[in-house]
Image: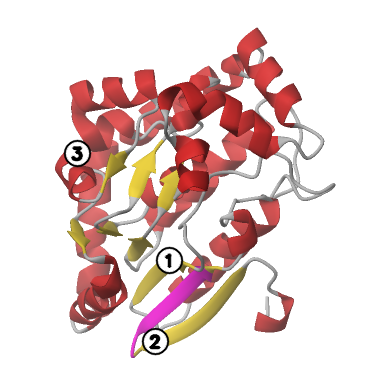
Amino acid sequence: MTTEDLRRIRIDDPAPGVRRVTLARPAKRNALDGVARREVLDAVHAAAADERCRVVVIAADGPDFCAGYDLDPAEGEKYADAGAGPGRFTREVVEGWLSLTELRLPVIAQVHGHCLAGGSELVACCDLVYVADDARIGYPAVRFGVPDLQYHPWLMGMRRAMEAVLTGDVVVGAEAVEAGLANRAYPAAELEAQVLAQAARIAAIPAEIVQINKRTVHRAMQAMGMHTAVRAGTDACVVATGTEAFGQFMAAASGGRVTAALDERDRPFGDGRTRTEAG
């Protein structure tokens, strides 16, 4: 992959040892189709293979970090990888994002604006998450289906997770920190500088020590069953795609009608897409 080949992201090195991958599809609110997911994964994995890189930052252009998965992708752009069979999409996104936890270097999410559904799944598999104080993180897609990557109980605890998956409501800024979805919240104007400062602190530690320390945390989560539970949730998501409610929503969203379908889904709740359009 060369920078000339990129269609959905930008790559730069904003500081010594720091590789930044920027979602660069602002007209679509950085919705993640198969092209975007493959480019993000390839870029982060390439950074992990580059000994000059100590930390990766995932950021985004435009007013929102990510509106979620692209519900009506162009022909041939739904999937990031070759494959077939029931649950192909769900298994692909789950395994792709979980792969970030296995890399030698830390991955930091720099979140502003809306970070919804599939965008929150990407962020959940990053090692550190820093948000703008007006960032809105949530999973409104539970109003018609089941999350692909079920991170909620592990990051939020049972009570907050239950509320999140039964309502689809978002949490904002400091509330995301309190709920366990982020490390710290900063004023939007300071977010980039604060993230790069934290990345520089990590980059100053010997890479082999950072690698071991990252893995101790992830190994502990795996020993408690996190990855097993997340993969079990994949099957529940696949089952949900066969429900009448899911089918009705996807039919309503097809043929370029995603905006109208999301408006209809979220209007009774006053958030999600409706809130995005209103600012």
Residue depicted at 42% across the width and 45% down the height:
120
Task: Decide if residue 12 is on the left or right side of residue 84.
Answer: left
Say which of 139 and 208 sits in front.
139
Query: What is the x, y in percent for residue 147?
Result: 48, 29
**CA distance separating discs 3 and 2:** 30 Å
Segment colored magenta: 16-22
Tell me the distance, in whole angstroms, between the alpha carbons under discs 2 and 1: 12 Å
Is residue 171 located in the magenta-colored stretch of the structure?
no
Q: Residue 104: horizontal and vertical position, in percent?
A: 36, 66
Q: Give the main secondary structure, helix, strand or loop, of the magenta stretch.
A: strand
Secondary structure type for disc 1: strand
Residue at (64, 66) in percent of width and height: 8
The mark nearer the N terminus, 3 or 2, is 2
* Dots 3, 2 in contact, CB < 8 A: no
Which three-letter amino acid code belongs to the residue tagged 2?
A: Pro
Residue 11 appears left or right of 257: left
**Is residue 122 in view from this perspective?**
yes
- The amino acid type, in three-letter code, at marker 3 is Ala
Outermost residue, top side: 244
Say which quadrant the N terminus sits in.
bottom right
Q: Residue 260: where, in percent of width, then height?
A: 67, 33
Q: Nearer the viewer, residue 53 or 156?
A: 156
Helix, strand or loop status at disc 2:
strand
Q: Secondary structure at mark 3?
A: helix
State the separation of the CA atoms marked 3 and 1.
Answer: 21 Å
The residue that label 2 is drawn on is: 14
Q: Which mark is residue 58?
A: 1
Q: Which mark is residue 179?
A: 3
Looking at this view, name the residue that lies furthest to the bottom: 16
Q: Residues within 10 Å of mark 2 (few under 14, many from 20)?
A: few
Asked where in the image residue 153 lies, by quadrant, the reply is top left
**Does label 3 or label 1 sit earlier along the sequence?**
1
